[in-house]
Image (cartoon, rainbow, N blue to C red):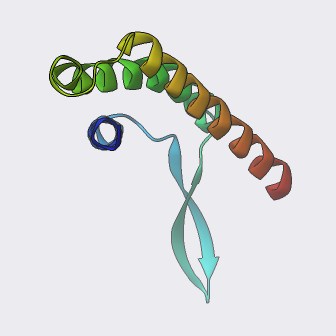
Amino acid sequence: MIYANLVSWFAGVVIGFLLPSGLVPKPIESDGHQVSIITQGPRWMAMALASFVVACPLSIGIEYTALLPFQKRKFPFNNLGRCTTYANITSYVVLSVLVWIHLQFIR
């Protein structure tokens, strides 16, 4: 399982770098100089929510594919597809709740 999660994490990092982040530069003045900081853009929240919807099934597919060779050799899962689906849905629900709690405290 750790192997499958590492493969999924690595794929997510690579895919994440290829997609827009929703972050935008914001000009501010600091000590009389014009500088930029990176902040959330107008569509950041929509993009963040959409990423969860896309990432969950993608993680299921990546982890299923990563674990498939092990199912036949070392670990005879009864239903590998169901196992990876339930594990990923559970983890994304937990992550979503944690993000929601975090957002309640930063407003």
Foreground residue, 56 or 32?
56
The image quadrant that residue 2 belongs to is: top left
In the figure, 34 relative to 62: above or below?
below
Residue 45 x %, y %: 65, 35
Which residue occupies the extreme bottom position in the image?
31
Disc tally is: 0
97 left or right, relative to 41? right
Please give the name of the residue rendered at 69% of the width and 44% of the height, measured from the top-left corner.
Answer: 99
Residue 56 x %, y %: 48, 23
Foreground residue, 97 or 24?
97
Please give the name of the residue rendered at 51% of the width and 27% of the height, measured from the top-left corner.
Answer: 87
Foreground residue, 49 or 10?
10
Quadrant location of the N terminus in the rendered image: top left
In the figure, 24 relative to 78: above or below?
below
13 left or right, relative to 69? right
Residue 25 x %, y %: 51, 56
Foreground residue, 81 or 46?
81
The image quadrant that residue 77 belongs to is: top left
Residue 18 x %, y %: 29, 36
62 left or right, relative to 74? right
In the figure, 76 relative to 3: above or below?
above
